Amino acid sequence: MNRNTHRRVWLIAGPIIISNISVPMLGAVDTAVIGHLPDPKYLGGVAIGAMVFTFIYWGFGFLRMGTGGLTAQAFGARDADEVRACLARAAVIGIPVALILIALQLPIATAAFSILEASPDVEALAQEYFFVRIWGAPATLMNFALLGWFIGCQNTKAALWHQLSLNGVNIVLDLVFVLGAGWGVTGVAAATAIADGVAVVIGLFLALPILRKLGGGFVRAKILEASKIRRMIALNVDIFIRTICLVLAFAYFTAQGAAFGNVVLAANAVLLNFQTFMAHALDGLAHSAEALGGEAIGARDRKAFRDAVRVSVFWGMVVAVGFTLVYLIAGPFIIDVLTGIETVRETSREYLVWSVAMPLIAVCPFLLDGIFLGGTRGATMRNAMIVSLLIYLACCYILVPLWGNDGLWASLAIFMGARGLTLGVRYPALARSVGREG
């Protein structure tokens, strides 16, 4: 494998991993500040409320994923006007969508909380969280577009500072609003909404030098070009369906955990922080595969594409083994940091084995997601996720009645494995489709 490819992978992945780790750090702070309140209902309320936004925002994650892949290909083709147009099109789509979400907040909340099974106290706190955080929707979706564009341009320093500013401000406001002002669940939601707004301003500031270096201009005809808009819409619809299926899987996981009671719900929320740390680290390498793979596709260089994939997979495996070892050794300590409620600690330790095993199972689907995003193969990703979701739901139907919460975690592990398998069988066709040998 080319040494230069190793270097380029880490020039992209390194800053992204650092910035991504700040995301689960934020989740851990949310869990820690709420988890040390005297009743597990507060932790459950934040878990349910955050899950609703995960469902909503992951559904519109195409603003990051689609923008990143399309920008990477335009960057590889050295089309400065198109690189600029990718960002503009994402903003044109994202801001109106966010305003619609705010306008429809009451029916969205009614639908979401009618589906979820939780105690009345937990549901009341989750609604309190929802109706505060929803006002950050325009900033949240704009941040998705900015992050995808930074990655597509391979400017990971900008992505790093953008994410660190977003999550750093959020963490500080968490501490001020919850521990300082005593606002509880409302404080966590307000901190997130305000931090998103601050991050948009910082992100636009970070974009200015990139735009100057790119050259070209924002050409209205290019931005509104019918064929490019149709391509972006088609890709975004496929990614939207794919992401909704992913969110449904985790929403079902949370809902099933809630049915086991507040303590199990809280323990699963604690352990999902383990998955989030792992996911955001592996995402850094997935982003490198997306950016370098997309650039190679834009340049029609098959050798560069294969090199980018091989190096990203190699380092992904190394990172996954590292997480498994850390969770195996330090898992109980991490649980104790995240919550001071003894019953939740004991229950979390009971199911810790699943968090230890998950990095080794999840590494393949994470990396393949990045590879297929760089190739803008939305339909393939959509179909693979639909099949994986059906397998997951079938496993839940069989295993949860047999093994309870262990069956739920086993079904999640099978879901991750199915994602890797269903994408993996389509990789050879993607590799063959890339241009010429460089």
Image (cartoon, rainbow, N blue to C red):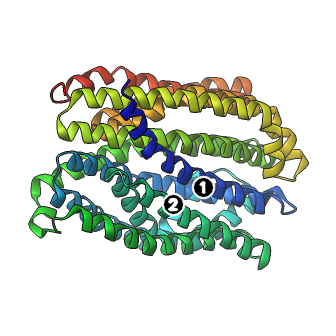
Residue 12 against residue 209 in the figure, above or below? above
Q: Nearer the viewer, residue 9 or 386?
A: 9
Which residue is rendered at x = 62% and y = 69% of the image?
189
> According to the image, label 1 marks what residue?
22
Residue 18 against residue 353 in the figure, above or below? below
Which residue is rendered at x = 37% and y = 52% of the image?
151
Whether pointer 2 and pointer 1 mark residues with C-beta atoms closer than 8 Å, the reply is yes
Which quadrant is home to the N terminus? top left
Q: Nearer the viewer, residue 94 or 45?
A: 94
**Could you tell me residue 259's position as x and y percent?**
71, 43
Q: Residues within 10 Å of mark 2 (few under 14, many from 20)?
A: many
Tell whether 352 sits left or right of 4.
right
Instruction: Tell me which numbered mark, 2 or 1, is placed earlier along the sequence.
Output: 1
- Report the residue that reaches farthest toward the front: 3
**Could you tell me residue 411's position as x and y percent?**
60, 28
Q: Residue 163's mark?
A: 2
Tell whether 292 sits left or right of 365.
left
